[in-house]
Image (cartoon, rainbow, N blue to C red):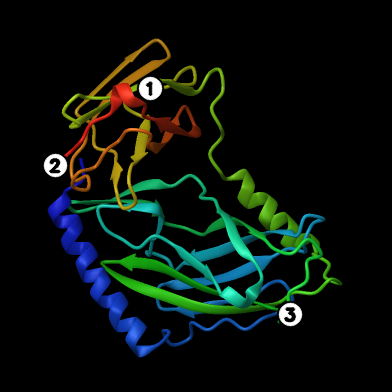
Amino acid sequence: MMNIVSAKICRLRIALTVLAVALSGALPGAIGTSRAETSAWAVNEGGRMRLVVLPADEQGKRAGALQIEPSPGWITYWREPGDAGIPPSITLAPDSGYTLTEVAYPVPKRIDSGDLRDIGYDGPVTLPLVLSGPADGRLSSGELKASVFIGLCRNICIPFQAEFQLALTLSETADTEETELVAAARRTLPEPPSADFAVRSHALSADGKALSLTVTVPEATRQDEAEIFVTGPSGHVFFKERERRLEGNGLSVVLPISGLPRKYDIHGKRWGVLVKAGGRAMETTLAFDKRQSIFRD
């Protein structure tokens, strides 16, 4: 289970830094200017990032991607960063005419740093996006404005904020490089459940302090190689195990659960789970029905 005290301290420090950044404006070099559907790179000490948006389809949806390239020795974070860190945040201006309907995350890795265990990426990563807008693809302003906020860390975490503006028109054409970039990002996502890789069962203990999982894993998976990340309420990820057993292709684990919000009722909730095993990665959800319900004070 995550070290709740150290995580809260780290996040408090990060929050104070974020507040300082917000009061002082965007970081130097963090403003991206538009270039057709691909922004210029926004750069800071820990790395760089840019936004790519492809032309609208017949339903007014636009595929896109956020490219993040940490500098050597730096890392960035998954949607739940682990013990400390800053998850990516993308906000579209209300007058843009578009809404962000999907942010997908490539398979992350666990990154240990002393007593802290983070979940993220220690190299370039591209997050696939989907934007939904008017059916004809038009924007009243002709611009898509997006504010992106990520964390880049090496010993210390540096909040990195960039403001992007992209000119979107009906005459756009995506070049091969942009199209392949988005397609390649999609190929790095975890696979959905399948016959040989799926969650067989899951149950939360009556006191809500332990989650038991049994997963069908790919053939030839070693007991010590598999990794499981369970994401609960926002800001909570569980990946430290109390028990593990592999019998055939069935991997059973018990993860301690603590630090949930007060009076948390799990009835009807859906948690996420990512499993890495046998050189593959699978992501799905865990649904909790009334029989698995608990009420925490």
Please tell me the numbered disc located at residue 297: 2
Percent across and percent down for residue 220 are 46, 18
> Closest to the observer: 210 or 121?
210
- Find the distance from the CA under tag 1 to the CA under tag 3: 53 Å
Q: Quadrant of residue 56?
A: bottom right
> What amino acid type should be assigned to the residue bearing mark 3?
Gly
> Closest to the observer: 154 or 106?
106
Residue 195 falls left or right of residue 229 = right
Q: Earlier in the sequence, mark 2 or mark 1?
A: 1
Vertical arrangement, residue 151 with respect to residue 2, above or below: below
Q: Quadrant of residue 170?
A: bottom right
- Find the distance from the CA under tag 2 to the CA under tag 3: 50 Å
Q: Secondary structure at mark 1?
A: loop
- Find the distance from the CA under tag 2 to the CA under tag 1: 39 Å
Question: Could you tell me which quadrant the C terminus lies in?
Answer: top left
Q: Secondary structure at mark 3?
A: loop
Residue under label 1:
222
How dense is the environment of label 3, judged by Cα within 10 Å: few (below 14), some, or many (20 and up)? some
Residue ranking furthest to the right:
171
